[in-house]
Image (tube, helix red, strand yellow):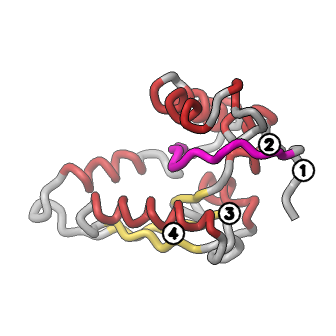
Amino acid sequence: MRKGWVLVIAAVFLMSGTALAQQFSWKMQSTWPATDFHQVNPKGAVEKIEAMSGGRLKINLQGAGAIVPPFEVLDAVHKGILDAGHGWPGYWYGKHPAATLFSSVPGGPYGMNHEDFLGWYFLGGGHELYNELLQKELKLNVIVFATFGETPEPWDGSPSP
């Protein structure tokens, strides 16, 4: 995402309704088809963000392929085509094999189940490592946040059909 977007959110959340009359609108796309059960998660995140902003931040969530092809969501956020995206880190394996360490690999990353993984992600430095991978290693202008923990599933690193 564009630099400073976190500051925009902080300003929206911290200012009172009378101090900030401006409304923001973001374009967001997921890697999931609009009818896929995985779309429930970004819909919930959008609802929570809009509620926390007092309705001042509206997010237009689209399903896979609505604006860009599903596996181009990360690059589209980096380039500013999308303001936000929702996907699975394993999809970025082709960009860097370490991306799968932040996804639902068999046996869990580092031998953890998804609850352990989220604890490590939020309290043990995983969030910082994932952002370091994307920002410093891959030079992407994005900030990532985990929104849910996926249970481990087998995946051989090949693109989905």
Q: Which residues are magenta?
A: 142-155
Mark 3, other Cα within 10 Å: few <14 / some 14–19 / many ≥20: many
Q: Main secondary structure of the magenta part?
A: loop
The earlier-in-sequence mark between 2 and 1 is 2
The earlier-in-sequence mark between 1 and 4 is 4
Q: Amino acid at mark 3?
A: Thr
Per the image, the residue denoted by label 1 is 158
* Residue 67 image position (x, y, % from top left): 65, 74
Is residue 136 positioned above or below 58 on the image?
A: above
- Residue 4 appears left or right of 137: left
Mark pair 2, 3: CA separation: 14 Å
Per the image, the residue denoted by label 4 is 27
* Residue 40 image position (x, y, % from top left): 54, 66
Label 1 secondary element: loop
Is residue 102 positioned above or below 29 on the image?
A: above
Per the image, the residue denoted by label 3 is 31
